[in-house]
Amino acid sequence: MDNDLSLYNVRTDLALEARELAGGPQIPGVWSEAEENEGISVDRMQIQNPLAAQRIGKMIGNYVTLDVPLLRKGDTDLQDRVATTFAREFEAFLQRVGVQPMGSVLVVGLGNWNVTPDALGPLVVENLMVTRHYFELMPGQVAPGYRPVSAVAPGVMGTTGMESSDIVQGIVQQVRPDLVIIIDALASRDLTRVNTSIQIADTGIHPGSGIGNKRKGLTRETLGVPCIAIGVPTVTYASNIVNNTMDMLIAHLQKETPNTQPLFGVFGGMGETQRLQLVKEVLNPLGHDLLVTPKEVDKFMEDMANIIASGLNAALHEAVDSSNVAAYTH
Amino acid sequence: MDNDLSLYNVRTDLALEARELAGGPQIPGVWSEAEENEGISVDRMQIQNPLAAQRIGKMIGNYVTLDVPLLRKGDTDLQDRVATTFAREFEAFLQRVGVQPMGSVLVVGLGNWNVTPDALGPLVVENLMVTRHYFELMPGQVAPGYRPVSAVAPGVMGTTGMESSDIVQGIVQQVRPDLVIIIDALASRDLTRVNTSIQIADTGIHPGSGIGNKRKGLTRETLGVPCIAIGVPTVTYASNIVNNTMDMLIAHLQKETPNTQPLFGVFGGMGETQRLQLVKEVLNPLGHDLLVTPKEVDKFMEDMANIIASGLNAALHEAVDSSNVAAYTH
Amino acid sequence: MDNDLSLYNVRTDLALEARELAGGPQIPGVWSEAEENEGISVDRMQIQNPLAAQRIGKMIGNYVTLDVPLLRKGDTDLQDRVATTFAREFEAFLQRVGVQPMGSVLVVGLGNWNVTPDALGPLVVENLMVTRHYFELMPGQVAPGYRPVSAVAPGVMGTTGMESSDIVQGIVQQVRPDLVIIIDALASRDLTRVNTSIQIADTGIHPGSGIGNKRKGLTRETLGVPCIAIGVPTVTYASNIVNNTMDMLIAHLQKETPNTQPLFGVFGGMGETQRLQLVKEVLNPLGHDLLVTPKEVDKFMEDMANIIASGLNAALHEAVDSSNVAAYTH
Amino acid sequence: MDNDLSLYNVRTDLALEARELAGGPQIPGVWSEAEENEGISVDRMQIQNPLAAQRIGKMIGNYVTLDVPLLRKGDTDLQDRVATTFAREFEAFLQRVGVQPMGSVLVVGLGNWNVTPDALGPLVVENLMVTRHYFELMPGQVAPGYRPVSAVAPGVMGTTGMESSDIVQGIVQQVRPDLVIIIDALASRDLTRVNTSIQIADTGIHPGSGIGNKRKGLTRETLGVPCIAIGVPTVTYASNIVNNTMDMLIAHLQKETPNTQPLFGVFGGMGETQRLQLVKEVLNPLGHDLLVTPKEVDKFMEDMANIIASGLNAALHEAVDSSNVAAYTH
């Protein structure tokens, strides 16, 4: 059971997927609600106690996941609506963690500039409206409706020689923000969620999360201030693609032939976890269980970074109207 | 049958894979030989008559494929050896198409700068040693051992509004090279070949090849001069990953349990083509049969572009020694 | 005199500056008018006969120069107004050269991606709305108000081994546009015009123009179709900075002390050309007469490319409204 | 006098230039020596007491300046020799500040990725060999001859909202290196030094240094560990170009005509400082006293970053031989 949990942890960074793997929304100690509006699904979940946390393999806390299946089509109207929805959900997190309207915020963009599917954090930071220096250099003269926002992309261990968490901890101790927002690219267990979902969580980032080497946690415990994490799945394992597709295939044929035993034999009757392990057993030793990303990754990352930066600008500054958020990024 | 062939065409741009799908190296009208040397496999094939061409779904001509399974490890020694092997095989093509040592060459890098897995051509062009202008501006004064080489990255239809083939044809008519070399990113049907294989062919590029919209051919017929194509698979379809993995899984278990009927049912007994079609039938309508590429695509593309540019520099210029080819690129 | 003219040619690619050097707007055979509107100056000039052309050192034809001294401030409202003014002036050129509303256009972005002050052409091409392929692939189905526009950035001789003009001529012969628009970075003789001026001319590009090696002309004569050139000064020579500043200094002090002889001696009494030659005589042998560009060149180039791309989109397509041109670029 | 000093501070970040402005190498309390070897000049200087420091306008400490007038020619052999010379001079600084062979080092690359002439620091960091994480993750298993090196490019205040010095102080407190090396782009008062000089100083970085907004100091006092600064002039003011050129012109003519009074009047007889102020008085109110950089800035920055990264790799790690330093960067 523990092994399985750790397996899931490796496989998905999304609490929504982990909940489904653990048995769906009926798990005791898990509250959730879902709504859908013109192509944007919002799932809100609370993991309420240690038992539920253990069962799902995610920390106690609040999670919101936006699923927008058509996001990869490049429709700018849809992108604007996603940014607005994201801003509204994010504002609820700001209230939940108790940050005041003028409370200062440090945005941390994890990941590697030079690895396109890992560049979400740096791309968001580049598009963000930073204001803290105006408050420092001209106190009392900043227009109303803005709060002090700073931002940093600390790089990855392979290029800095330091854990991102060490860099962030040092900066937090020096700059003393009231809130830290962490942005990171994630691994999903479902190719269809890659670059179409956004997760917000008030749990921070835990060891093993993210698609790179970010081993120490970035949490309220380690940083001393509230910590909201924003994650977007940008890669999935080849083995997940195989497993999910076989699931779909079996479910698809089951509609016509309820007994799939003759069609898929023992394999068809396996649980999802068992089947995934079998697939991994074949792919892993051959070095074929690669993390993959869609061919159009450059465009998808750029669009997603714009959505998140626009949404954050609107959520963090009252003077930025959620109807025109897109104008505030490049 | 025709349908199946067109299916294969969509699925793989590699003649080696198409040959395997069509029944392996024993097909009449197909000559081939293979060798392996310290991690570098070389497969040389000749499609000799129209019947063989139809059966395989590739043009009559010569094909050489380098397979280097460990190429994605980033070992610079191995990369240098691949560049040297590539240069040697490419020189054989130069002799085969009858280009003289001083014959002029135009290198065409197809693809899109801004789509990382499609940027192979532009990246090679950027690293290539171009010399034609020295011959034009200072005739008779260029050091011996060099030939006139020019290079262009014509862009893709989505950003130019023109077919690449129209741009290349226009340039060829103006500049009149003795040989055109075309470099393009390809789709493989096997994730394990993505960024580990290089194909050289004296057939040029045909409609439907390449991973983007390059619909007209670039061949000796359309350009009026010999045409050598260099291709590297950089993407594969999700459905190929599923299909190949299930093949491996069934073959793997067959070693222990020769009769896989109980294990995999009817599905396990299907031919590869039939199974692939089933997988596609499920994924396609959901828009889930994405082209995917490994997460480390940026680094893999850079390494591969360096190998090909180094190899071409050595093969095209006698003064560039194949032992130190790497020094001539960035 | 001839020598002086060739000197001016090297010094400035702007007809406006050449006219001032040749004696101002009163030169026989030169018609000109100027207007200024909220920070945007527009100078329209016609060089009407060979004598005037020789005296100014520019071809017979029409020239419009926009001067916007505050453009480097990064004010987006001003940028939008410049794009609108540019579109209006460019539309007059379209009528002048007799291109019909549905006439096809090829936009050529000269220059080098990897040399920031020379990247204007490629940057404009990247931001341009290209439509020709829709007309080719779906004739009769394109929405009204658009014309066929294609675009190419041919690169520079140092990286292609070919003259840009050869590449463009080849493409023009293949694609047969009704009009060619050429975009290039220029050298100004005045640092204050660098990245604040835009020149439009119906003369095409002549040998010696542009800041790189583009030696053959791109004109109606060589291409067989009308040819409009758009140029932006992005560099100036160190010697020009010295000369202009000394001019300003002497003029400045002359206001107070009409006789500057005691203050500046013989040097102060020299004509501008003589003084420039003296400065060049000192700087050139030391290799110090560098072409320079402002420190903020990256941002200035991006802004200018957006202005020109927006303006062209509005001028070329009736369906693109000049009030919202900015929305059509990245 | 104080005003003049502050003027010089704005004008040059190079101690060598400040010393010349203050009267040359004979200033009491200043020790210096110079040597020249095949095109590479090395000037070593010690500012020994507060009086000398005040007179020159630079901190007490050791300064080494490499001047390589032909460095912009792109000669790779010369670049390798400069890297080797730089490594040797830098090793002397390591000994001087008392860092042990295994002492840990944090390299800080100041500046802005997106402003080419300000990108020196980030470019060096990208090319540096970082090793600290190997010592952390596999203590005792790192090959001999390496020391723990980490590196960070903290960004600029305009994009982070934080002073670089705050970010660096935070990281230093967390990571506790034995030495901090700071790399920054500088302003020279002489265009001929732009991208041809490298300054090393054991004084750290002081307010007002650097070409951007890095207002707080990065010194042994603020960071608590020794601090070596490496600076390269990449820009100069237009007024400096005018002033230097007039100096050269007057000196040039003085060889033939010792009395330049008739030639240049009062202006020719002015001291350099007075003349510079006059030039600034004319240019400044017009907004024309721009910081400028050579047209080829992209290539110059890349070359310089490679030289410094190669030199640092060789100086910091005994296992990296100064004869093959170039192989360790991209």
Image: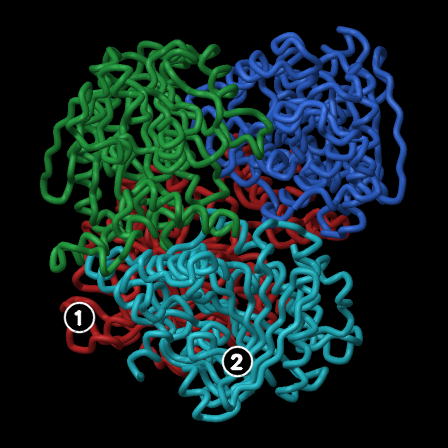
Chain colours: A red, B blue, C green, D cyan
Assign the N terminus of chain A to one quadrant of the image.
Answer: bottom right
Looking at the picture, tell me which residue is in the foreground, C2 or D16: C2
Amino acid type at mark 2? Pro
According to the image, label 1 marks what residue?
Answer: A142
Q: Position of residue C199 (x, y in %)?
A: 27, 32
Are marks 1 and 2 in one subunit? no
| For residue D318, above or below residue C97 | below
Q: Position of residue B9 (x, y in %)?
A: 64, 20
Q: Which mark is residue D25?
A: 2
Q: Residue at x 49, y 78 (%)?
A: D24
- Residue A44, quarter of picture: bottom left
Looking at the picture, tell me which residue is in the foreground, B129 or D266: D266
Q: Is C24 on the left or on the right of C12, as rendered?
A: left
Q: Residue at x 80, y 34 (%)?
A: B319
Q: Is C300 on the left or on the right of A134, as rendered?
A: right
Looking at the picture, tell me which residue is in the foreground, A18 or B113: B113
- Local crowd size for mark 1, using a 10 Å CA cut-off: few (<14), some (14–19), many (≥20): some
Looking at the picture, tell me which residue is in the foreground, A232 or C227: C227
Q: Which mark is residue D120?
A: none
Amino acid type at mark 1? Val
Tag 1, which secondary structure? loop
1 vs 2, front mark: 2
